[in-house]
Amino acid sequence: MFDIGFVEILLCAVIALLILGPERLPTAARAAGRWVGGAKRMVSQFNSELDRQLKADELREELRKAGDVSLEDVQKTVRDALAEAEKQEHIIKSGKPSSKQGNDAPPGPPSEKSSDNRS
């Protein structure tokens, strides 16, 4: 911004007093104060609106990122489930149990040879 010191303000006041005179100077000072106050309010409103918009944009971006992450998680889960289903389908079609299922299978009925050995 520009720098206005005390000397410059005093010089403007003296010039205003000489031009306007003592009768109109208070009215002009009030009008100038209203204009300055209005300008400050306008700048303040602009800044607050800009801050609100920036915060809203940040929130939208965070929501979009969270949605993307959530979508990726769901897609991964669906892909994993689909791969498992395809694996099970392949096992069923081939008729061969996988090595994991072979170990987990319950024992079958005893064979006749083992029955003969007991007698």
Image: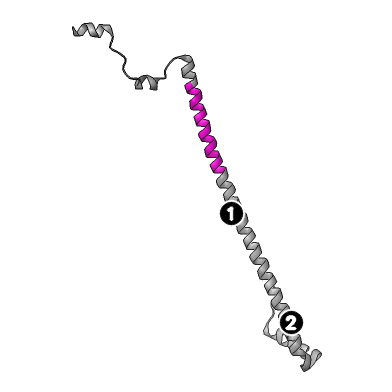
Q: Is residue 108 magenta?
A: no
Residue farthest toward the front in the current orientation of the protein: 109
Q: Element at badge 2?
A: helix
What residue does disc 2 label? 32
Amino acid under disc 1? Leu
Residue farthest toward the right in the current orientation of the protein: 19
What residue is rendered at 57% in x and 49% in y? 63
What residue is rendered at 35% in x and 22% in y? 104
The picture places residue 76, in percent across and down from the top left corner, at 52, 35
What residue is rendered at 46% in x and 18% in y? 91
The label on residue 95 is: none
Q: In which quarter of the image is the C terminus?
A: top left
- In magenta, the rendered stretch is 68-88
The picture places residue 46, in percent across and down from the top left corner, at 68, 66
Q: Can residue 75 be seen in this view?
A: yes
Query: As rendered, which of 21 and 30 lies closer to the eye?
Result: 30
Amino acid under disc 2? Ala
